[in-house]
Amino acid sequence: MDSASIRRDLVRGAAGTSAVRITSTGLGLVVTAMLARLLGAEGYGIYVYALALVTLLAVPATVGPAQMVIVETALLV
């Protein structure tokens, strides 16, 4: 592979990644607007509160098992 083909592949990959991120952001905005419209102010507030709570609780849940594996592996060695 020469330098030009590597550069071309890199640019193509970056363009694809950018397109996916822009599309994802746009869809997220549309879904958020639709949810707010359908649920109303109070319903959307409850939804966002629950989503934030689940997101905060997911952080220790994902860190805990990995730490446990490291500790248990270290104890076995």
Image: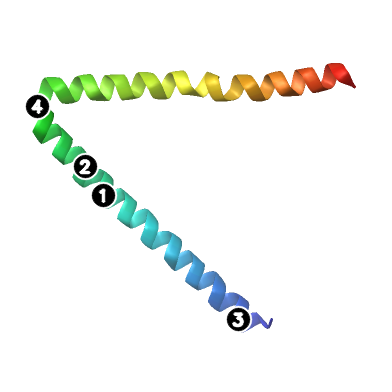
Which one is closest to the eye, mark 1 or mark 3?
A: 1
Q: Amino acid at mark 2?
A: Val
Q: Are marks 4 and 3 in contact (CB under 8 Å)?
A: no
How far apart are the two marked residues, 3 and 2, measured between alpha carbons? Answer: 39 Å
Secondary structure category for the residue under label 1 = helix
- For disc 1, the marked residue is 27
- For this rendering, which residue is in front, 7 or 50? 50
Q: Which mark is residue 31?
A: 2
- For disc 4, the marked residue is 40
Q: Is residue 48 left or right of residue 41?
A: right
How far apart are the two marked residues, 4 and 2, measured between alpha carbons? Answer: 14 Å
Secondary structure category for the residue under label 2 = helix
- For disc 3, the marked residue is 5
Q: Amino acid at mark 4?
A: Gly
Q: Looking at the image, tell me whether mark 4 or mark 1 is earlier in sequence order.
A: 1
Q: Amino acid at mark 3?
A: Ser
Q: Amino acid at mark 1?
A: Leu
How far apart are the two marked residues, 2 and 1, measured between alpha carbons? Answer: 6 Å
